[in-house]
């Protein structure tokens, strides 16, 4: 009898799929070399998520850590851009399995070498002597006039006869 009852019963389940895109912000979208980037997401609003790891990108000097939190599952953090100009993709994993993705640009000409990687100038036909290192300003010590020159500053006694 139980089998007959179960045979006529249909079990319905619904699973809500999370939105495909993660709603989060990485600002500014164009940053100076070595400039600061800010990431932010809200897990409880509009497709945001709870981060499961830092934001990573070849365009970041180091992974951007989520160091701020707040209402509505807010997570945020700041990081530094690399000094190499170019367009980069930043990503981070969400606790629900999604991956947040954003594109940002480090300003400058990617074809020109950065100052740290430019070749050093070759020998010059006009030899010059290197500039000496600047010397610190020397200050003359000034000793106050008073006690040592006047006998300690005590009062003099005068005897009148």
Image: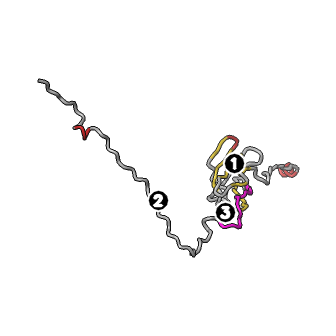
Observer-nearest of 94 and 24: 24
What count of labels does the image hold?
3
Placement of the C terminus among the 4 image quadrants: top left
Q: Secondary structure at mark 2?
A: loop
Left or right of residue 63, residue 26 in this image = right
Q: Position of residue 55 (x, y in %)?
A: 67, 56
Q: Is residue 53 magenta?
A: no
Label 2 or label 1, whichever lies nearer to me, is 2
Which labelled disc corresponds to residue 113?
A: none
Give the residue furthest to the left.
161
- The answer to whether 14 is drawn above or below residue 107 in the figure is above
Q: Secondary structure at mark 3?
A: loop
Q: Which residues are magenta?
A: 100-113
Which labelled disc corresponds to residue 40?
A: 1
Observer-nearest of 112 and 95: 112
Q: Secondary structure at mark 1?
A: strand
Q: Residues within 10 Å of mark 1 (few under 14, many from 20)?
A: some
- Which residue does the numbered mark 3 point to in the structure image? 84
What's the CA distance linking mark 3 and mark 1? 24 Å
State yes or no: discs 2 and 3 in contact (Cβ < 8 Å). no
State yes or no: discs 2 and 1 in contact (Cβ < 8 Å). no
What's the CA distance linking mark 2 and mark 3? 32 Å
Residue at 24%, 34% (x, y): give it: 153
Residue at 82%, 49% (x, y): give it: 14
Residue at 70%, 54% (x, y): give it: 94
Give the residue furthest to the top.
161
Q: Residues within 10 Å of mark 3 (few under 14, many from 20)?
A: many
- Which residue does the numbered mark 2 point to in the structure image? 134
């Amino acid at each position: 009898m139980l089998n007959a009852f179960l045979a006529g019963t249909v079990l319905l389940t619904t699973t809500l799929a999370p939105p495909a895109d993660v709603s989060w912000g990485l600002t500014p979208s164009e940053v100076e070399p070595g400039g600061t980037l800010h990431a932010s997401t809200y897990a409880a609003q509009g497709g945001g998520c709870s981060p499961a790891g830092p934001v990573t990108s070849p365009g970041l000097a180091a992974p951007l850590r989520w160091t701020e939190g707040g209402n509505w599952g807010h997570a945020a953090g700041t990081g530094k851009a690399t000094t190499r100009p170019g367009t980069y993709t930043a990503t981070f994993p969400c606790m629900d399995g999604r991956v947040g993705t954003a594109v940002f640009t480090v300003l400058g000409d990617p074809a020109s070498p950065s100052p740290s990687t430019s070749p050093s100038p070759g020998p010059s036909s006009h030899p010059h002597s290197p500039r000496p290192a600047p010397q610190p300003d020397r200050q003359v010590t000034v000793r106050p006039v008073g006690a040592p020159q006047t006998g300690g500053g005590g009062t003099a006694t005068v005897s009148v006869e």
